[in-house]
Amino acid sequence: MSGHLTALQRGFGRQLWLGVLAFVLLTGGFALALRSVQLDRELHERYQHALALAQLSFEVQHLVADLRAGHASAHDPEHVLAPADLRRAIDTRLAAMAGLPLTPQERGRVEDLQQALRAGDTRASTGDESYIRIDRALHALVAAVRERTELAARDAGRFNDAAQAALAVIAALIAALGLAFAASASRTLAASRRLMGQLDQLAHEDALTGVMNRRGLDESLPVEMARAQRLGYPLTVAMLDFDHFKRFNDKRGHGAGDALLRGAAQAWRKQLRPMDLLARYGGEEFTLVLPACDADHAAALTERLRPLMPEHQTFSAGVATWNGSDPPEELLRTADIALLQAKRTGRNRTVVAGREPQMALPLRVA
């Protein structure tokens, strides 16, 4: 039993460690998935900022082109805004650019663009040098944003690839852990069943003789009575009690008395049918439960058991057949009364309940 208990404890320990490892792997997988989603969100935001910055740069470029066309006397001056309006529109776009989440490099490009616009005397000059500087600043700004976005996309792609590979490994490990957990749980369940079986056996088995104990008899007898009533066969019990067992114990010692009880029980059990029950009722008293057996066959069985007694000892027996209505305790009491009668009439004999020898009464003289 201690071996099964140790195996059960080890099984629970393995399952605990497997569960902890699976939890750690699941936590790691969840963290990877969460980080991947976070990177995707950040990349999406960067794309949105890059698009907004590109759109503003495009608008600034067109406004600067309109401003330049206005100073160059455009062919369609009616559709060209006044220089002051164009300048305000450009300043508005530049302010919007500055409000975007830019890196220090990108913010420096925006400042370069602002300086290029301030450096050019757009209201008086008709030269192209200031506009070329503005175009270069715009292209540098767009290139910086594109470079950052592409770098972020590459980093996110590499992380996602690594995360997917890690998640695949984690999924494989979790599957393997699941199989290991299932195998461990199966072994633990088997050990638990064996342990429960041993505990049940200990609860219903007499430790000295190895046969059923009183508790097992109290649980089994009602079941046998219900089966006998359902199937319609007789059910008989026999109470067996060793003769002069206290004298034997006092003379030979308790160790010899235990050996006598054990030897008799094991020898008797070999003579019984698989359906028969042998229980130690208490002390040196045993009970036989014999399904599909009437009183005559039960009495004959007790006689066959007598030669099997170790140390040439004897026993007395009382036999009672169930009437189909008495409760278990009444049936045992009836057999016990027959046993007492067997002891009173000389021991080493079997008495069937209802067939007790009648004592002759003295004649009454008038």
Image (tube, rainbow, N blue to C red):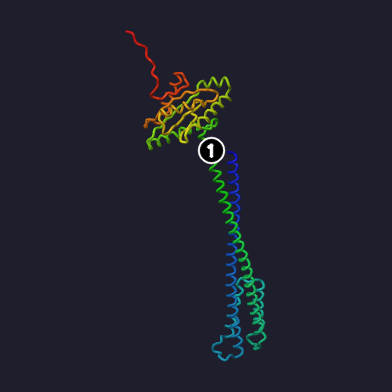
362 relative position to 178: left or right:
left
Question: Residue 289 at x, y = what percent?
Answer: 45, 31
The amino acid marked with disc number 1 is Leu
Label 1: how many Cα within 10 Å (few below 14, some 14–19, many 20+): few
223 relative position to 196: left or right:
left
Q: Residue at position x 61%, y 50% from top?
A: 17
Question: Residue 125 at x, y = what percent?
Answer: 65, 87
Q: Is 230 situated above or below 104? A: above
219 relative position to 61: left or right:
left
Q: Quadrant of the N terminus?
A: top right
Question: In the picture, residue 353 is in which quadrant?
Answer: top left
Q: Is 209 situated above or below 76? A: above
Q: Pointer 1: what residue?
A: 199
Question: Residue 202 at x, y = what percent?
Answer: 53, 35
Q: Residue at position x 46%, y 30% from top?
A: 288
Say how many tags the image has. Answer: 1
The residue at the far top in this view is 366
Q: Quadrant of the C terminus?
A: top left
Q: Residue at position x 57%, y 86% from top?
A: 82
109 relative position to 361: left or right:
right
SS for callout 1: helix
Question: In the picture, residue 227 is in which quadrant?
Answer: top left
Question: Residue 139 at x, y = what percent?
Answer: 64, 80
Q: Is 314 situated above or below 38? A: above
Viewer-proximal residue among 358 and 76:
358
Question: In the picture, residue 67 is in which quadrant?
Answer: bottom right
